[in-house]
Amino acid sequence: MTYLLSAVGLSALKALGVSREEAARLAGSKLAGFAERCPGPGKIAELHVALAVSRLAGGPVELELIATDTPEALLAARLVLLCAEATGAARPLGFVAVKRFAPGSYDATAQLLRAALDRLGRARGERFVSITTGFNLVAVYLALAGWMAGARVVYVDEGGGVHEVPRVRVAPEDVEIFK
């Protein structure tokens, strides 16, 4: 089975018609009845990516998410996984919440990198990392983790095209200003 690690973005809440007020109310509650609210997988960016990767890999995808520890991001992760299962877009594996990593507080960049490397190290089969969704700085660290773990780092465009991001070697001796 193909493994996909992706950041979760708040656009999933918008795709499901969840307002900020409703998100605050739902943050710690059960999500009974939300499966019926799931739009087609193409309307939720993380599932759009999963479908594109499954076409590229030629089979089903197992989806694991990385979320920041804001109530909205945690709810978005739960809803994306619920919709992954409800629509059959991917087999949901769960999500990891990275604490102290939210706009204005980036103390947990090392924790994010470690969590991504840990998940990629345990994954079986072909491994993909999506930098399509989520908070921009999270995508940067996911790309680094993907390259370090030997996974395929991909960006999926709105039309479903999968673009593999070439591995970048990052070392002082590779940068002209350090020579």
Image: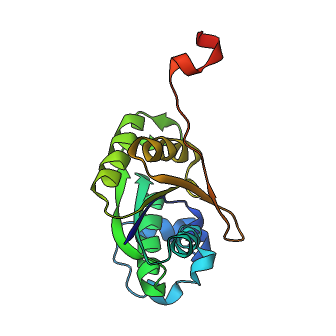
Q: Position of residue 122 (x, y in %)?
A: 27, 56
- Return the residue found at the far top: 179
Q: Residue at x 41, y 33 (%)?
A: 107
Residue 56 is left or right of residue 121, and the answer is: right
Q: Residue at x 59, y 84 (%)?
A: 40
Q: Position of residue 120 (x, y in %)?
A: 35, 53
The quarter of the rendered structure image containing the C terminus is top right
Q: Position of residue 177 (x, y in %)?
A: 64, 12
Q: Quadrant of residue 79?
A: bottom left
Q: Residue at x 39, y 41 (%)?
A: 113
- Return the residue found at the far left: 122
Colour logic: rainbow
The quarter of the rendered structure image containing the N terminus is bottom left
In the displayed structure, 70 sits above or below 158; it is above
Q: Residue at x 47, y 43 (%)?
A: 147
In the displayed structure, 114 sits above or below 71; it is above
Q: Please name whichever residue, 56 or 103, is drawn nearer the observer in this view of the structure.
A: 56
